[in-house]
Image (tube, rainbow, N blue to C red):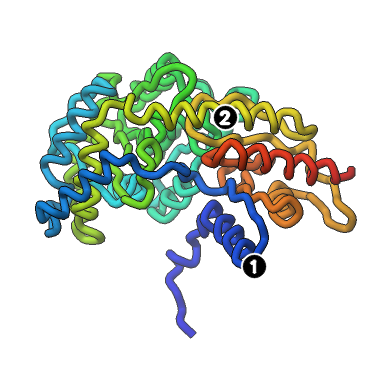
């Protein structure tokens, strides 16, 4: 029997991927499952991006590229950051990776030493915690509830900072909640960080363009924090390019060089063809993808109206992304026949097996009394999912 490393034994499986696999397994058995567990746009990649990829093949962009990505791609990203975010980055401050997930782990591994504390507002994306633990850091969650829009306050932030704090990781708009910090809220958090110059900040902005309320603000635009903020973004969500696997960071030259070093040993550069497709996405006017955002906005309303009408679910109005994160504590302790619903995980399994709707339990995101639903599906599918959930929950008894 092979004895695996403690490193891999202690690494948790991604809950979102695990639930999606359960959904696929049931579908393979002929069960009509509606999968609302994965955060993947149901749109196809826009044609102008696919055409750019075809040109790249025809023009023989088929060889190894520089480890941080083609210079012309990094130049396009730098122009995008200036145009959309008011941020000035030289191409040598940008590293293109195989998805934003790799961008984040590169930065975490380059910054965190054993015992360093990593602050993560909860609810958080499932991988932030595991990445910090894999890097031998100590995770310090900062809890935010639905009543506060799932956003932490400056007072909460400062109360969790210690002399061991090295890194703060957050996303806005957020996965899993859809919560999006306003400019004033981020500037208020920034005032706290100004007092602690040793803390770095990973700002995950992958849902930047999928926002319904307010405007997007990048924390790196606060001059005093510019050198300490690692801005993470990519093309998967807003441009429906999940399978192309392109993400990037923009950071100080020192951090970008460190991330290039680690990437050079583990993966080297991402796909040359994907890079050139991403270049077309970076050069595009954000209005070119507004049709997707408009569709998500309509679906958001359907989900908020539908789920809020189901007794036992408490929903907020998310500012962005394509998730709802309802509180389900009122349903815990209920039962359906002999089936007990003691935890949110029990509820998710009940919804999968009774309603045939795949969701994700909130404990994976650091919030035990919640579940996550993605509305990256057609309006008809979402309406059907809501009615299935309604019928299943109405069967529960206390």
Residue 300 got which mark? 2
Residue 198 picture location, percent across and down: 31, 33
Q: Is residue 43 visible?
A: yes
| Count of numbered circles on the image | 2
Residue 344 picture location, percent across and down: 70, 47
Above/below status of 288 relative to 236: above
Q: Is residue 158 visible?
A: no
- Who's the residue at 39% across and 44% down the image? 44
Residue 275 got which mark? none
Q: Nearer the viewer, residue 94 or 222?
A: 94
* Helix, strand or loop for disc 1: loop
Residue 390 picture location, percent across and down: 77, 39
CA–CA distance between discs 2 and 1?
Answer: 31 Å
- Who's the residue at 13% across and 54% down the image? 58
| Dot 2 or dot 1, earlier in sequence | 1
For mark 2, does the 10 Å Cα neighbourhood hold few (<14), some (14 to 19), or many (20 or more) residues?
many
Residue 295 picture location, percent across and down: 49, 30
Above/below status of 204 relative to 260: above
Residue 29 got which mark? 1
Q: Residue furthest top?
A: 184
* Helix, strand or loop for disc 2: helix
The quadrant in which the C terminus is found is top right
Task: Name the side, left or right, on which 164 lies relative to 175.
Answer: left
- Who's the residue at 85% across and 45% down the image? 396
Task: Name the side, left or right, on which 239 lies relative to 61.
Answer: right
Q: Nearer the viewer, mark 2 or mark 1?
A: 1
- The quarter of the displayed image where residue 326 is located: top right
For mark 1, does the 10 Å Cα neighbourhood hold few (<14), some (14 to 19), or many (20 or more) residues?
few
Above/below status of 152 relative to 52: above
Task: Name the side, left or right, on which 122 lies relative to 183.
Answer: right
Above/below status of 246 relative to 147: below
């Amino acid at each position: 029997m092979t004895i695996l490393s403690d490193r891999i034994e202690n690494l948790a499986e991604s809950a979102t991927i695990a639930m999606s696999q359960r959904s696929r397994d049931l579908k393979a058995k002929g069960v009509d499952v509606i999968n609302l567990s994965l955060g993947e746009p149901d749109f196809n990649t826009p044609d102008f991006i696919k055409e750019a990829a075809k040109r790249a093949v025809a023009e023989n962009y088929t060889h190894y590229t520089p480890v941080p990505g083609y210079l012309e791609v990094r130049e396009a990203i730098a122009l995008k950051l200036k145009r959309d975010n008011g941020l000035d980055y030289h191409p040598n401050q940008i590293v293109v990776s195989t998805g934003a997930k790799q961008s984040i782990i590169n930065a975490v591994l380059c910054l965190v030493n054993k015992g360093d504390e990593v602050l993560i507002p909860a609810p958080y994306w499932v991988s932030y915690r595991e990445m910090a633990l894999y890097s031998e850091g100590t995770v310090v969650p900062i809890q935010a509830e639905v009543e506060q829009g799932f956003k932490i306050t400056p007072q909460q932030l400062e109360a969790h900072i210690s002399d061991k704090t090295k890194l703060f990781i957050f996303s806005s708009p957020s996965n899993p909640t859809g919560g999006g910090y306003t400019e004033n809220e981020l500037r208020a958090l920034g005032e706290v960080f100004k007092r602690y110059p040793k803390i770095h900040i990973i700002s995950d902005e992958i849902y930047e363009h999928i926002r319904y309320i307010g405007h997007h603000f990048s924390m790196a635009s606060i001059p005093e924090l510019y050198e300490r903020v690692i801005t993470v973004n990519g093309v998967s969500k807003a441009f429906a390019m999940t399978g192309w696997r392109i993400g990037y960071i923009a950071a100080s030259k020192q951090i970008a060089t460190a991330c290039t070093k680690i990437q050079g040993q583990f993966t080297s550069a991402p796909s040359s063809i994907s890079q050139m497709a991403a270049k077309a996405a970076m050069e595009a006017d954000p209005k070119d993808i507004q049709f997707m955002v408009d569709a998500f906005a309509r679906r958001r309303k359907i989900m908020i109206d539908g789920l809020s009408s189901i007794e036992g679910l408490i929903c907020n109005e998310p500012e962005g992304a394509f998730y709802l994160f309802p509180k389900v504590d009122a349903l815990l302790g209920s039962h359906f026949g002999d089936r007990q619903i003691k935890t949110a995980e029990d509820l998710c399994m009940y919804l999968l097996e009774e309603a045939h709707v795949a969701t994700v339990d909130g404990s994976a995101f650091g919030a035990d009394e919640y579940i996550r639903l993605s509305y990256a599906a057609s309006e008809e599918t979402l309406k059907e999912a809501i009615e299935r959930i309604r019928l299943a929950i109405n069967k529960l008894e206390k």
